[in-house]
Amino acid sequence: MELLTRPLQDQEATRLNSEIPQNFSDYFSFKKDQTVCDGPLSFEELKLEKSMIVIGDVSCKKTLSVPQGRSLIITGTLTAGAIIAVGKIIILGDLQAGDVYGDSFCNEVFCCRGDAKVRCLIEKGHDFQFMGDLDGKCVASISNVVSIAKNKKVEKLYLGGIDDQKRREIFVPEIFDSNGSLKSDLAVRRILDEKPLLQKISD
């Protein structure tokens, strides 16, 4: 799908920068004449081929994937069936998603200023920052780089790391190798096949 783009106006950039939390400004700022897309944008499935700034909301029915070296900046709300985060994702609105998997060897960030609701989030070396409430069935921080500023309404919450045995109790065996180690390529494949990461999900 060919997206219509335009240059960001000076006053618009100034206004948007005033809405970025201070800790997010280390990762991104809006600048005059940056190429942006106007939302709302809707996709069946999206693997980001180049970095994108969206002024408004984004929805993705299936999997939204942001590869290494790419960034997705959304000034509105992001709704996605699932998210694979290897590149940078910054959301100034709310987030609603199914399974979320982040692995960038701690080189990139996933920042959400609003409230977030996910089914399952696995952080395997990816910096997640939530400024609002976080609601979900399971959040597992393997590398201990998930921060939640407000309320944590998560059924299974592991922020200080999670040992191998507990991982195997919670997640499906298909994302582990023969040695019992959680493998990113297996988790990503599971998400792309639209299958859950958790062993049991009671909707």
Image (cartoon, rainbow, N blue to C red):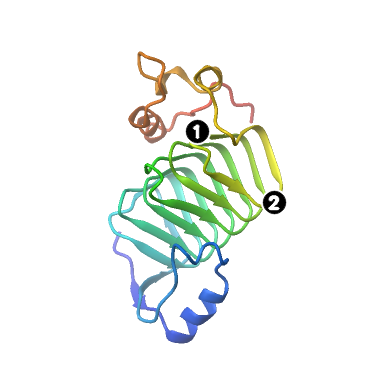
Local crowd at mark 1 within 10 Å, few (<14), some, or many (≥20)?
Answer: many
Relative to 200, is 73 on the left or the right?
A: left
Residue at 41% x, 25% y: name it.
182
Indicate which label's residue lies in the foreground, 1 or 2: 1
Residue 150, labelled with which disc?
2
Local crowd at mark 2 within 10 Å, few (<14), some, or many (≥20)?
Answer: few
Among the 4 quarters of the image, the one containing residue 157: top right
Residue at 49% x, 20% y: name it.
164
Where residue 24 sits: x, y (%)?
Answer: 52, 62
Where residue 125 sits: x, y (%)?
Answer: 43, 40
164 up-or-down from 37: above or below: above
The residue under label 1 is: 142
Which element type, helix, strand or loop, lies under badge 2? loop
Q: Nearer the viewer, residue 22 or 74?
A: 22
174 up-or-down from 25: above or below: above
138 up-or-down from 20: above or below: above
* Amino acid type, label 1: Ile
Cα distance in 3D space between marks 1 and 2: 21 Å
Q: Residue furthest bottom?
A: 11
Residue at 67% x, 50% y: name it.
133
Give the quadrant of the N terminus: bottom left
Where residue 86 sits: x, y (%)?
Answer: 37, 46
